[in-house]
Image (tube, coloured by chain):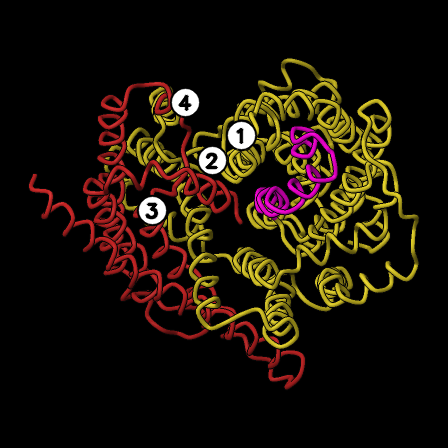
Chain colours: A red, B yellow
Amino acid sequence: MNSDLRSALWAFAGKINWGVERLCALLIAVLVLDIWFGIIARYVLELGITWTEELARYIMIWAALLAVSSGAHRREHIGLDFIGRRVPDRVRDVLQTGIDCLGIGFFLFLGFYGVTMTVDGANQFSMIFGMTMVVPYMAVPVAAFLAALQIFLTQFRPRHVDDDPFQDIEKQIEAHGG
Amino acid sequence: MTIVIIIFFGLIFIGVPIGYVLGIAGVAGLVQIGGDNFLAMAATRFFGGLNLFTFMAMPFFILAGEIMNHSGITQKLAEFADSLVGYLRGGLAHSNMIASVLFAGMTGAAVADAAAFGNTLVPAMEKKGYSRPFACAVTAAGSIIGPTIPPSNLMVIYGSLMGVSIAGLFAAGILPGLLIALICMAVIAAFGRRLGLPKSEQGPSLKRIFKAFRSSFLAILMPVIILGGILSGIVTPTEAAAIAVFYAFVIGVFVYRAITVDDVIHMLVRTARITGIVFLIIASASILGWWMTFMQIPQIIAAWFLSLSGNPNVIIALILVLLLLVGMFMDINAALIILAPVLAPLTLEIGMNPVHAGIMIVLALNISLMTPPVGACLFVLSSVTGESIEKISYSLLPFLVAEVAILALVAFWSDLTMFIPGLLGL
């Protein structure tokens, strides 16, 4: 494939990821504010509200699931590297493509059934808000399709990104919960 | 059942990310029990697996740790630790351990600890005449104190998944964590003369201790607030984690003045990314978990273990060996999420308290982080310092033996683990 097109596709993946990561940051910030408000309402204002907890759960799910696509973009989802490290580059590339195909298949499957779940969610209502479950459930198909797209776009990732040793350290730190 | 097991181990072996493997094997399990009748269950289990309020403590503790790290607190804690024990033979090695304990009260992750200290304390130790492999070994040995002393993300995950009191787990982790620090300091003292570890010419100085304490006081107060709030039952772990974020944020922005708006965005993004990686594993494991429950896999494995021996001590020993082996090769969050539902019923069967069993499982996986060939802490230290894994592993051996001894003590002597939870009525 033409290298300009590859670069353009990889840049496109980067832009999507930039937007998704900022959205995740915003959601985490709202999550923090929501729980802070819940604490103040419970211990200071003694309001006895419970919706902050339900809201927090759904924001957390949206933020964490959207971030799955970021992990896919950065190849941070951790797996064993027994074979990958012991085979020639060409074999490793083929193996990686196979692994990516499996990932895309899984997320497309999840996205498809996530849409079904979301549609069914129109008739289900959250315990406290009483809102339709479409909004929380939608996190699954949106995140799954985004992850599938990002895995597909990693096929156009320049090799040197994989070869950065410092990224390996970052990956290890992040994959082990900071 | 066989096909699901083959898919699971086969995909793990060829290097498919664990979050995908669990989902794919789970879907294969759904197909195996009901053709396409149960496929819709995959999405609902994926969502349901995350729909727990207690999980939220995890991103908050990650964020609080991020903020504290960014505020340059690691250096201040190291200075305080050095003021306490720096005058002993091998003083910097001892202070590395004390700093790990202090750091543990703020973050819940071993690998971050290893990376932070690998960048700061290892070069400082080398400059004072310590060999680099030994400095790395001390750092690796100390890094597992992080997720043992609360707050600990592994405990949050275990407590949330298995319905065990997170406050109880936090309380139970304190003594084992302190014991690990003590035994590692004993190893340093024992090897001090033989290895010719340097001894500071300065004696202990109360003035220096007071000065270092004053500059790191606000950071040291953080674990007191977190643990005090949770263990006294005033706030839930999730609320305590949110308070920790608030406290860290106020200190970072207004006291240390080390955090900008860009830093905040960067830390929020990192928190989301770390959470996303772990939550994908949790959500996907929930699909496989449903199949395992349907097929009664935990009961089958428990029965198999019990068929090997009816002696609870033998079962505990087998569990420890299994955890140490699995943790050597697999990410420990994933190992915990996969193995906890399998092992927890077994530990109940042999009469273990769920909190005691939880600490034993968490500690064993923590120790496996620093076992060769691919323990994550070893890998990170080797990458950060440029030292070979073989040399670090050799220097690490006495620490490893000592920590496994503490693990055995924790596993076989429940009173040790349950002392503080019992005292607090948790």
For label 3, the residue is: A74
Label 3 vs 4, first from the N-terminus: 3
In magenta, the rendered stretch is: B109-137
For label 2, the residue is B293
Kindly identify which residue carries mark 1: B298
Left or right of B260? Residue A76 is left
Q: Amino acid at mark 2?
A: Thr
Label 2: how many residues lie within 10 Å, few (<14), some (14-19) or many (20+)?
Answer: few
- Tag 4: residue type? Phe
Q: Position of residue B410 (x, y in %)?
A: 77, 33
How far apart, in angstroms, are the residues tagged by discs 3 and 2?
34 Å
* The label number, if any, that marks residue A12 in the structure image: none
Query: How far apart are the two marked residues, 2 and 4, measured between alpha carbons?
Result: 30 Å
Position of B354 compared to B212: left or right? left
Task: Determine crowd level at label 3: few under 14, some 14-19, many 20+ residues with C-alpha closer than 10 A.
Answer: many
Q: Earlier in the sequence, mark 2 or mark 1?
A: 2
The residue type indicated by label 3 comes to: Arg
Is residue B135 shown in magenta? Answer: yes
Badge 4 is on which residue? A82
Circles 2 and 1: CB atoms closer than 8 Å:
yes
